[in-house]
Structure formats: structure tokens, C-alpha cells
Image (cartoon, grey):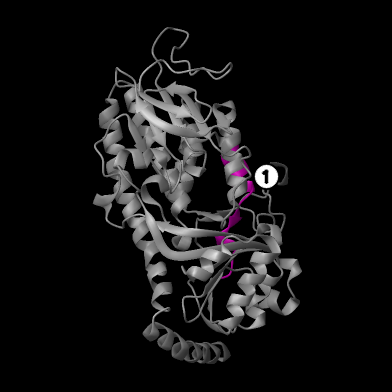
């Protein structure tokens, strides 16, 4: 592939500063959390960046809410302006205000609580809200409705992308932030960088006020997990960026969630039935989920959070996972094309750390690129150091996430189902005795 690449008015990727000095040109393929975080940081530090994103609307996203631990928040502060951080914290729900997480069985019986969250620095934020705030920080460097369909190099070795409309763009560095099925990472690795984890997830949103008073009291201002035999699990996340706001600044709040809300995720082992359910939408998908849980003996009160969900919020998706071995991640020689986030270390949401890791990837890459701009490093060395750290980070979060995946799948075996069936009533009884004391 060669040539100078086509251009569209208003979209020329200039690489000359006013003083005539070359400015590094960077293309980011994909406008998810990691790609937008990187682009915001690059823009803030004077790099020439363009993000090509296939979505035409940054709010066209779903899934669970996002948890940002202290490391992810520190990374964001290196990437976005202080005013964006302030808006983010004013739109986030602080974990330290939540009650300890709970573990239930399929009949709604309490099995136990997690540790106190009083000292936790972590925050929860709606995925749509976070993506919108990052897109605002990227500004007009975000090109929506533009899909990268091809990758190559010019005759002099410059990375080049081809867009769906047939036009092409050159850059000094191409970064794939295009998710689990990344075109960029596949190009680099010579094949897929992740595979199905064996679980299909279903997510939705339920306003707390829509639940009956007894169920609101049972769930409480906490997140929790309900487990059962045969791989059926239900995660219920509590989000309240108004009452539990990290910063009580109503005029800076951008959250789409206006009060106490449960953002839940149902999980089942992948099967012909779950594959057929993935084709459903709205009421049809919600009803199919309820029917599946009921056939497996779940109590109605445990399912109320699904029954009262906004039908338009209910969606299905496959869990994909990269290797948990750090040495298997980013299995290519460092060069002028790289990738980050789920494109490299696709992570199931069972650890709640995938988006935070992508943000840390972005901050790390930015720091190494600033060394290149300062003349203290070369581009290939910078990319090599970035990828080495990303491999370690990705392996760590994947190991955590896959523990839960393997536990869920273990309950789908004859032995696992028998153990779960026998153990949960005992655990519930022990929990009741402890509470009475």
C-alpha cells in the first residue's frame, strides 16, 4: 500500500507546527474509553492526533458501570484537564459511601458480606457518562462515523489506514484502541488476540424507586452477587452519582444516572439457548432472561431487579478474554503500530478493571511519547517500553477476572452444581445465626 492518502476538507492531519518543526502525527483507531483517554492526553500535550470511531454517537454504548480505582484516577489526572477530572468526580458514585458488598443465593438468602468499603478510593461511573466526558476533552480531534477498514504502510514505511469511504491517512504512530475484535491488533498478531470465555452476559438498568420496598431494603445501597447451580449468576451494581457523589457539585454533574440505580448483569454459560437469546431485544430479551432464571429455580424476589428494568437498557454480549500469561499479550515486535486496552488484553467484566487498565495503558503510552517529543527516546524504544508494562498490567487483571469466570463455569458441572446446591443453604443458615448474635 502506498501513496499520500486522500483528504477531506477540515480533516487534514497537519504535522507542521508554526515554527516549522515536525510534530508527531498519531492516529487512534477506536473511540472507546482507552482510545479517548489517550487522545485527550495527546491533545492536551500538543500532539497531532485524530481518532476514527465507527459510532456516530458517543452515547451509543452500554454494559456495566465502570469502577475506577486509585491508579486509574491518577492516570486520568495525567491525561485530561483538571476541569474534566472535576466533572468526572462530580458525576461519580463513591464506593466509600456504600454498604459492604453482599453475596446471595438464588432464593435471595444472604450468604455473607464483603469487607468494609469505608477507606476505598474507588469510584463508580456510568460508562456513557465517562465516554461523553472523554469525548468532550478530545473535541474535534474525534471523527465519529469513520471506520478504519484497512492497515498498511507507504513506500517509506509510514503507517497508513484506509477508511470505509475509501480515503486513507498517514501517521507516525498508529494505535489500535478498537476493542476486543481489534483490526489493528489482529494485523499485528496475525490473528485474534482473544477468544470467547464461555459466558454470555446480559445487562440492564433498574431505578431503585421502581422496586418494591422489601426488595429495596434487601438490596440496599450496595453491590452484590447472587450465585446458583448450572452457571447462573446475577451481579447487581449500585450506582448513585447524586446522593453518593464524590464531589457535591451539582452544577458540574454530567451523570446520565439521576439517582439510586441498580445496573445489573446476568451471566450464563454459552449455549445454543444463550446464542438465540442474543438476537432478542427489549421486552423479549428481558422476558427470556426471566424465563431462564425461573426454570433454574430462582425466587421471584431475586428476579425483581430484572422484571422492573427499563426494557430499552437490556442488552446481551459475549465475554471474551485474552491469555492470562503476560508473555502472550502483544506478541509482536515493537514498532510504529501498537494497540492498547481490550485490543490487547480483552478482559471479562468480572473484575471490574478492564476500563481502568485501558486508561492506565493510555497514560503510560503518553508518558513514553512525551519522551520521544523531548528527544530523550526514540519512537520504537518508547513503544517497546510501553508494551512491556502493558503486558504485565494486562496479565494481572486477566488473572483476577478469570477467577470469577472459572468459578461460574465450575458450577455448571455435575459436581459443581451438587456442591453449590448443598452449600448455599448451609451458608445462608450460618449467616442468619451470625446476624442474630
Classify residue 327 as left or right of residue 105: left
Query: Dot 1 surroundings within 10 Å: few (below 14), some, or many (20 or more)?
Result: some
The C terminus, quarter of image: bottom right
Q: Which residue is mark 1?
A: 254
Q: Is residue 266 magenta?
A: no
The image quadrant that residue 211 belongs to is: bottom right
Q: Residue at x 59, y 48 (%)?
A: 61
- The stretch drawn in magenta includes residue 98: yes
Quarter of the picture holding the N terminus:
top left
Picture residue at 49% right of the left edge, 41% below the top: 76
Range of residues picked out in magenta: 83-99
- Quadrant in which residue 410 is drawn: bottom left
- Residue 227: percent from left, percent from top: 50, 77
As rendered, which of 160 and 135 lies closer to the eye? 160
33 sits left or right of 220 in the view: left
Is the magenta region chiefly helix, strand or loop? helix
Closest to the observer, 178 or 21: 178
Q: Residue at horizontal 35%, vertical 48%?
A: 192
The correct choice, above or below, for 410 with respect to 432 in the image is above
Left or right, residue 10 beside residue 183: right
What element does badge 1 sit on? loop
Residue placed at 24% from the left, 50% from the top?
327
Amino acid at each position: 500500500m502506498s501513496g499520500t492518502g486522500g483528504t477531506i476538507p477540515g480533516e487534514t492531519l497537519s504535522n507542521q507546527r508554526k515554527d516549522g518543526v515536525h510534530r508527531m502525527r498519531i492516529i487512534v483507531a477506536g473511540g472507546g474509553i482507552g482510545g479517548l483517554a489517550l487522545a485527550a492526553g495527546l491533545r492536551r500535550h500538543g500532539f497531532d492526533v485524530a481518532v476514527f470511531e465507527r459510532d456516530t454517537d458517543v452515547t451509543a454504548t452500554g454494559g456495566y458501570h465502570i469502577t475506577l480505582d486509585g491508579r486509574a484516577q491518577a492516570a486520568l489526572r495525567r491525561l485530561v484537564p483538571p476541569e474534566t477530572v472535576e466533572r468526572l468526580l462530580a458525576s461519580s458514585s463513591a464506593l466509600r459511601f456504600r454498604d459492604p458488598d453482599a453475596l446471595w443465593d438464588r432464593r435471595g438468602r444472604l450468604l455473607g458480606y464483603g469487607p468494609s468499603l469505608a477507606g476505598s478510593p474507588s469510584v463508580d461511573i456510568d460508562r456513557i457518562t465517562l465516554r461523553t466526558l472523554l469525548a468532550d476533552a478530545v473535541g474535534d480531534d474525534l471523527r465519529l462515523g469513520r471506520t478504519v477498514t484497512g492497515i498498511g504502510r507507504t513506500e517509506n514505511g509510514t503507517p497508513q489506514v484506509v477508511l470505509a469511504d475509501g480515503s486513507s491517512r498517514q501517521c507516525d504512530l498508529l494505535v489500535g484502541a478498537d476493542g476486543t475484535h481489534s483490526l489493528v491488533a489482529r494485523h499485528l498478531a496475525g490473528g485474534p488476540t482473544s477468544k470467547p470465555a464461555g459466558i454470555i452476559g446480559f445487562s440492564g438498568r433498574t431505578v431503585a424507586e421502581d422496586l418494591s420496598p422489601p426488595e429495596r431494603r434487601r438490596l440496599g445501597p450496595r453491590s452484590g452477587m447472587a450465585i446458583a447451580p448450572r452457571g447462573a449468576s446475577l451481579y447487581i451494581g449500585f450506582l448513585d452519582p447524586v446522593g453518593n457523589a464524590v464531589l457535591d457539585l451539582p452544577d458540574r454533574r454530567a451523570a446520565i444516572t439521576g439517582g439510586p440505580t441498580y445496573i445489573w448483569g446476568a451471566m450464563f454459560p454459552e449455549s445454543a439457548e444463550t446464542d438465540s437469546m442474543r438476537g432478542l431485544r427489549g421486552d423479549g430479551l428481558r422476558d427470556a432472561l426471566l424465563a431462564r432464571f425461573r426454570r433454574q429455580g430462582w425466587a421471584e424476589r431475586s428476579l425483581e431487579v430484572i422484571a422492573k428494568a427499563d426494557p430499552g437498557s437490556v442488552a446481551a454480549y459475549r465475554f471474551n478474554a485474552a491469555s492470562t500469561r503476560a508473555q502472550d499479550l502483544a506478541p509482536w515486535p515493537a514498532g510504529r503500530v501498537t494497540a492498547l486496552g481490550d485490543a490487547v488484553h480483552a478482559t471479562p467484566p468480572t473484575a471490574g478493571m478492564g476500563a481502568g487498565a485501558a486508561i492506565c495503558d493510555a497514560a503510560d503510552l503518553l508518558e513514553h511519547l512525551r519522551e520521544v517529543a523531548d528527544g530523550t527516546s526514540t519512537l520504537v524504544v518508547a513503544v517497546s517500553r510501553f508494551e512491556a508494562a502493558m503486558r504485565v498490567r494486562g496479565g494481572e487483571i486477566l488473572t483476577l477476572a478469570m477467577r470469577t469466570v472459572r468459578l461460574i463455569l465450575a458450577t455448571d458441572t455435575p459436581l459443581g452444581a451438587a456442591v453449590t446446591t448443598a452449600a448455599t443453604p448451609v451458608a445462608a443458615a450460618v449467616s442468619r445465626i451470625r446476624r442474630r448474635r
